[in-house]
Amino acid sequence: MFFDHLVLGATGEFLNIGDILATLVIFTLLMVLLKKFAWGPLMGVMQQREDLIKSEIETAENSRLESQKLLEEQRSLLKDARTQAQEIVENAKKQGEVSREEIITTARAESGRMKEAAVQEIANERDKAISAVREEVVALSLLAATKVLGKEISEEDNRQLINETIAKAGEVQ
Amino acid sequence: MEHGAPMLEVFGIWFNLSNVMMLTIAALIVFLIAYISTRKLQLKPTGMQNFMEWIMDFVKGIINSNMDWKDGGRFHVLGITLIMFIFVSNMLGLPFAIVVNGDLWWKSPTADPTVTMTLAAMVLILSHYYGIKLKGLKGYAGGYIKPMKFLFPLNIIEEFANTLTLGLRLYGNIYAGEILLTLLAGLASAGAFGFASAIVPMMAWQGFSIFIGAIQAFIFVMLTMVYMSHKVADDH
């Protein structure tokens, strides 16, 4: 053949059709068997893993979004609660202020009233005491006059007389 | 140095029994590795499953660097099988060669041009098949006058050149490696002095051959996908 001197290890003057067939058959058979017994299952597992990872990523993303939402919700709730608490405190303060004013006013009025009552009472007592003293003085004077005169004049006359005297004396004084 | 081959004629067809045997052994090894490592498949991979998945992802990367996954996904199984089969075939000839009655029995099946050319031709014919299947006869034929009409002859030549280089590159690398290993083995068995002087280059060359074998398997699959994408993909 024309190329014979180029072919290293050539074994003869003929083409090895058998080798070609053997190579093709063996390789094709190997490929088919491997696809059935090795590559197929392996590819299936890899695909499965890919799907799993994809779904896991999706789940993680979803739960992240959800937690974000929850956090937002909690935050707004907290803010509301804080505002509410502030309001309550504010209200309580105002309420306290109002009741303090009220109490003070009431107490003031009460004390004023009590003072007035006391003053009234004092005046009453004084008047009473004065009249009592007056009566006592009349009686004493009467007694004294009786003693002095040694005779008893009508008590009515006496009393009138003495009262006049005392009134005069009071005016003079 | 020059060994014969165990030839057998069946119904007028000649078989190189060494090739048949070594191809079978390589296919068996690949199948066993793949089969055993995909027995207990788990979502959380361990041990050999990791390794297999790494190979799958590696081939996937090769395909993705050449074409869309929707076009190239169908070549995934072909790519994984090719890369493992060629790598294991390349490795088979490294530890030893067995010669019985002057016939070379144990060698890399890829150290035979018939085998590598068959694989290369198979890949190229597949690329033509998928080119017609995916782009239609018109689109496929249109590929020959791209980018310009006068390049038609060059495109025709390219198809044959691709086949030839794809097969012969693999064959040449592996065959050369085995020739040198045979020479070194001959030196090592020549005597004590020969053994002493051969052992270091022997180890070095075997290490290098492992590297070459891996690289050639990668290149073969890479070029397979390049040729496929020429025929299948819309751009380029």
Image (tube, rainbow, N blue to C red):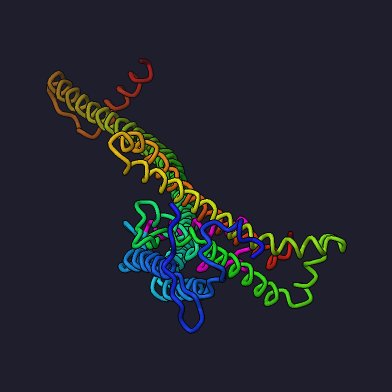
Q: Quadrant of residue A67?
A: bottom left
* Res B226 visible: yes
Instruction: Give percent across and percent down for residue B42.
Output: 34, 65
Q: Is residue B89 magenta?
A: no
Instruction: Give percent across and percent down for residue B34.
Output: 37, 65
Judge by depth and name the residue closer to the eye, B184 or A76: B184
Q: Residue at x 40, y 39 (%)?
A: B204
* Res A106 visible: no
Judge by depth and name the residue closer to the eye, A146 or B32: B32
Q: Residue at x 75, y 78 (%)?
A: B137
Q: Which residues are magenta?
A: B50-78
Q: Residue at x 35, y 15 (%)?
A: A173
Judge by depth and name the residue closer to the eye, A136 or A162: A136
Q: Is residue B55 magenta?
A: yes
What secondary structure characterizes most of the magenta part?
Answer: helix
Instruction: Give percent across and percent down for residue B102.
Output: 38, 60
Residue reaching furthest to the bottom: B11
Instruction: Give percent across and percent down for residue B231.
Output: 69, 67
Judge by depth and name the residue closer to the eye, B211 or B134: B211
Is residue B189 left or right of A28 when viewed as pictured? left
Is residue B130 left or right of A159 when viewed as pictured? right
Q: Which quadrant: the C terminus of chain B?
A: bottom right
Residue reaching furthest to the top: A173
Q: Number of numbered discs present?
A: 0
Q: Residue at x 46, y 81 (%)?
A: B10
Is residue B203 left or right of B61 when viewed as pictured? left
Q: Is residue A146 shown above or below A106?
A: above
